[in-house]
Amino acid sequence: MRKGVILDRDGTIVDVVRDAETGTISAAFHPSHLRLLPGVIGGLRALAGAGYALGIATNQPGAAKGQLPREAIERTNAALVELLAAEGIAIASVATCLHHPEGGAGGDRTLVGPCDCRKPRPGLLFELVAELGLDPARSWMVGDTASDLDAAHAAGLRGGLVFDDRRCELCPLREGPRGLGPGDVSGRNLEAVAVAILAAG
Ligand SMILES: [Mg+2]
Ligand SMILES: [Zn+2]
């Protein structure tokens, strides 16, 4: 079994999309929206270089909420994998939860309802652990919210938290890091988290 790092997408690898006119924030839903956050390339190269398989586990409820077609989500995920491949970083698999418990007007009804994969539930992580042949005891889930850490622990992984207290517009953690368990690590960007993971072993 291999060791691996499973990564959240939005706020961990890629930045959120800001609409300057309305001030609203959304997840990237087009390849042209993809902006890698600081430290991502260095952090992922360091992890891959140390032998960690890399996967992505992402909640994308936009199609269930009627905000965009699921093809837009799939196209954006594929473009992210290509973008990272161009930097020499191999993402072995992307696991996506397309569900939302309540959905929204015009949403795809087949995607609305409870599921086992929407983080903080661990379904996406179990899927990647099985697909990539990961050893949970040597593997990590890295994200930017307490929900990512809860999913990590529910799947028997250690958690890594990207927490930059100078970037608070998303504000899930503006009062400070939450959800860290024993053995977890945190850092102000993905490179700092990678350094901490490599130090922890
Ligand atoms: Mg996130
Ligand atoms: Zn789901």
Image (cartoon, grey):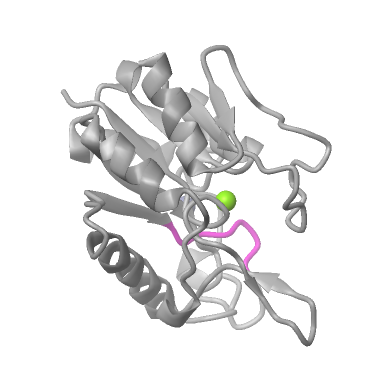
Q: Can you tell which quarter of the image residue 24 is in?
A: bottom right
Q: Position of residue 65 (x, y in %)?
A: 60, 72
Is 100 magenta? The answer is yes
Q: How many marks?
A: 0
Q: Position of residue 66 (x, y in %)?
A: 58, 79
Is 104 magenta? The answer is no
Q: Which residue in the rendered view is the most extreme toward the top?
A: 182
Q: Is residue 124 visible?
A: no
Of residue 67 and residue 3, the one placed in the foreground of this image is 3
Q: Can you tell which quarter of the image residue 74 is in?
A: bottom left
- The structure residue drawn at horizontal position 65% and vertical position 62%, both measured from the top left corner, is 102
Q: Which residue in the rendered view is the most extreme toward the bottom?
A: 21
Of residue 127 and residue 105, the one placed in the foreground of this image is 127
Q: Which residues are magenta?
A: 97-103
Secondary structure predominantly adopted by residues drawn in magenta: loop
Q: Is residue 5 left or right of residue 113?
A: left
Of residue 123 and residue 23, the one placed in the foreground of this image is 23
Q: Position of residue 89 (x, y in %)?
A: 25, 52
- In this rendering, the answer to whether 33 lies above or below 80 is below
Q: Is residue 80 visible?
A: yes
- The structure residue drawn at horizontal position 51% and vertical position 48%, both measured from the top left corner, is 118
- The structure residue drawn at horizontal position 39% and vertical position 73%, both measured from the top left corner, is 76
